[in-house]
Each structure stands twice: as C-alpha cells, then as structure tokens.
Image: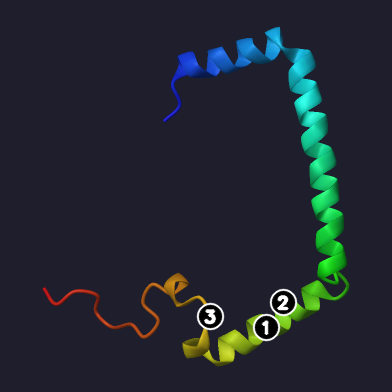
Amino acid sequence: MLNLADVYSVLGYCLRHSTEVQAYLAQRRAQTAVVHQQNEMRFDPVGVRERLLARQVQDDRHPFTNPHPAADLNPVNVPLSMS
C-alpha cells in the first residue's frame, strides 16, 4: 500500500528536480525507441495478430498441450481438495 507521505515526497522531488527528471525521462524514451526498433528487427510485426489468433485456436483444440499450464487453474475440473 502506498503511504501518502511517500507520494508527497516523490512529488516534491519531481518539482524540485524537474530538469533532472525530464532528462531521465528523455533518456528512457530514447532507450525505449532503440529496444522497440531492435525487437521489430528480430520479430516480424507483420501478421502478428493472425499468428496469435491461429495459436489461440490451436491451444483451444489441444488444451493439454498448453505451454503455460499454470494459467489453467483446474483444466480438467478435478476437485482441488479432498476435504
């Protein structure tokens, strides 16, 4: 839970050091742009939606081959407790 005093401290810091905060945010935006460009070079963004939808259909047809079984809390409706 956030402490109200901590929120005020952060706001005060940002107001007192606005030049440094703006420089930091500009640096992070530049880094984000570089990473975004690198990711687009590594992973073709064209057709992503179609590939994801096709994968979802395949996962729905084969629920026991789901690569993320932890996401299915109870995939076969087995009682989770014996009591």
51 displayed left or right of 9: right
Give coordinates of residue 83: x percent, y percent.
11, 73
Residue 64 percent coordinates (x, y):
47, 89
Name the side, left or right, on which 28 lies relative to 14: right
Circle 3 Cα neighbour tier, 10 Å, few/some/many (<14 / 14–19 / ≥20): few
Q: Quadrant of residue 11?
A: top right
Task: Give yes or no for contact between labels 2 and 1 (Cβ–Cβ under 8 Å).
Answer: yes
| Residue 13 in the figure: left or right of residue 28 | left
Residue at the bottom extreme, as displayed: 61
Answer yes or no: do the residues labelled 1 and 3 have beta carbons within 8 Å? no
Q: Which amino acid does the dot numbered 2 rest on?
A: Leu
Q: Which amino acid is tagged 3? A: Pro
Q: CA distance from mark 2 to mark 1?
A: 5 Å
- The local secondary structure at tag 1 comes to helix
| Residue toward you, 78 or 43 | 43
Q: Which residue is mark 1?
A: 55
Q: Which mark is residue 52?
A: 2
Mark 3, mark 2: which one is toward the viewer?
Answer: 3
Q: Nearer the viewer, residue 77 or 66?
A: 66
> Mark 1 or mark 3, which has the lower sequence index?
1
The numbered mark at residue 67 is 3
| Of the image marks 3 and 2, the number of the one nearer the N terminus | 2
Image coords of residue 43 (percent x, y): 81, 70
Residue located 36% across and 86% down the image:
76
Quadrant including the N terminus: top left
Which residue shows up at 81% across the image and 33% down it? Answer: 27
Q: Residue furthest top?
A: 16
Q: Quadrant of residue 23?
A: top right
Dots 3, 2 in contact, CB < 8 A: no
Question: In front of the other: label 1 or label 3?
Answer: 3
